[in-house]
Amino acid sequence: MAKKNINEMSFLDHIEDLRWHLIRCTLAILIAGSVAFVFSRFIFDTIIFGPKNMDFPTYKYLCKISQFFNFDSTFCAESFPFTIQNRTMGGQFSADIWTAIYAGLIIAFPYIIYQLWSFISPGLHPNERKHSRGFILITSLLFFLGVLFGYYVITPLSINFLGTYSVSSEITNEIDLGSYISLVRSSSLAAGFVFELPIIMYFLTKVGLVTPQFLRKYRKYALVIVLIISAIITPPDVASQVIVAIPILILYQVSIYISAIVVRNQKRKAKKHV
């Protein structure tokens, strides 16, 4: 059956169209998750438990920096003073399943964005579709950069701080498997979505909810919000918060530049129609 023209589609037709896009996204996640489940041993041993080992690249780099400045640092230790354990009968199986699903979400992200774009693009003008051809590529690139930043920066900083924190030598840290995986997952995914800030600002500017003047005016408040976000997704030490805040502030500045371009293009189109 041929797809109806968007001008001929009713509200229920749009809902039906959206339903099929969501079904395709779900199937993509399940298929990618199934592949991830097959390689679960590699995902756990190499990727998820990678930041637990002191030979992780981030620790080596930070250890060299601390040695250069002659600082005592936990980044140069031989191992972390904690172990990971499972306390429930189905804990490991549940962790395996949910990890595969989240891995499927990350792997299938470009396809999910493609389905989202396929749903909204028919409602755009031809010129808007032409100037937005790189939407899928840019959105996916920003997401993957964010995930990598979360995995290689936020995750090891959090593990190093929380894994070595101690209130007494009488206490032994035996970290639950679910708690550890949750930290790795939330750090990586949160950073991935935060890195979508320029894309979000682009669309908010397109619909008139945000202007570059507004973003510049409230830059100071944005700085406070960024620091709060950094405090939420990182351990409560100043160095970690600053490291995380810097790329977010850069993304905010990029968002201002993108917003200004959108407004400038809209003014040009308005002049042509006068």
Image (cartoon, rainbow, N blue to C red):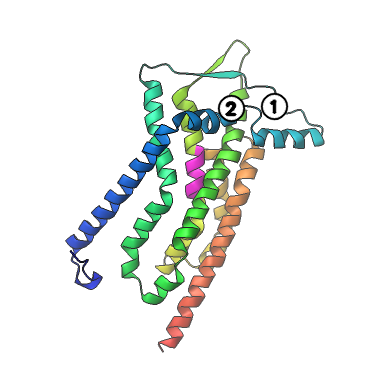
Q: What residue is shown at x 76% (from left), y 37% (from top)?
A: 65
| Spatial CA span between label 2 and label 1 | 13 Å
**Residue 7 vs residue 136, the one in the foreground:** 136
Residue segment shown in magenta: 187-194
Task: In the rendered view, tell whether residue 68 sits above or below residue 141.
Answer: above
Task: In the rendered view, tell whether residue 273 sits above or below residue 187.
Answer: below
Report if residue 223 lies within the magenta region.
Answer: no
Query: Where in the figure is residue 173, as x and y percent of width and height?
Result: 55, 17
Q: Residue furthest bottom?
A: 274
Query: Where in the figure is residue 259, as x and y percent of width and height?
Result: 51, 67
Quarter where residue 95 is shown: top left
Query: Where in the figure is residue 14, as x and y percent of width and height?
Result: 23, 61
Q: Is residue 236 visible?
A: no
**Residue 231 vs residue 101, the one in the foreground:** 101
Q: What residue is shown at x 35% (from left), y 71% (from top)?
A: 124
At mark 1, the secondary structure is helix
Residue carrying label 1: 74
Q: Quadrant of the C terminus?
A: bottom left
Residue carrying label 2: 52
Q: Residues within 10 Å of mark 2 (few under 14, many from 20)?
A: many
Kind of residue at badge 1:
Thr
Q: What residue is shown at x 60% (from left), y 47% (from top)?
A: 245
Q: What residue is shown at x 44% (from left), y 82% (from top)?
A: 269
Type of secondary structure dominating the magenta stretch: helix
Q: Is residue 40 left or right of residue 153?
A: left
Q: Going from the N terminus, do you reach mark 2 or mark 1 first? A: 2
Kind of residue at badge 2:
Lys
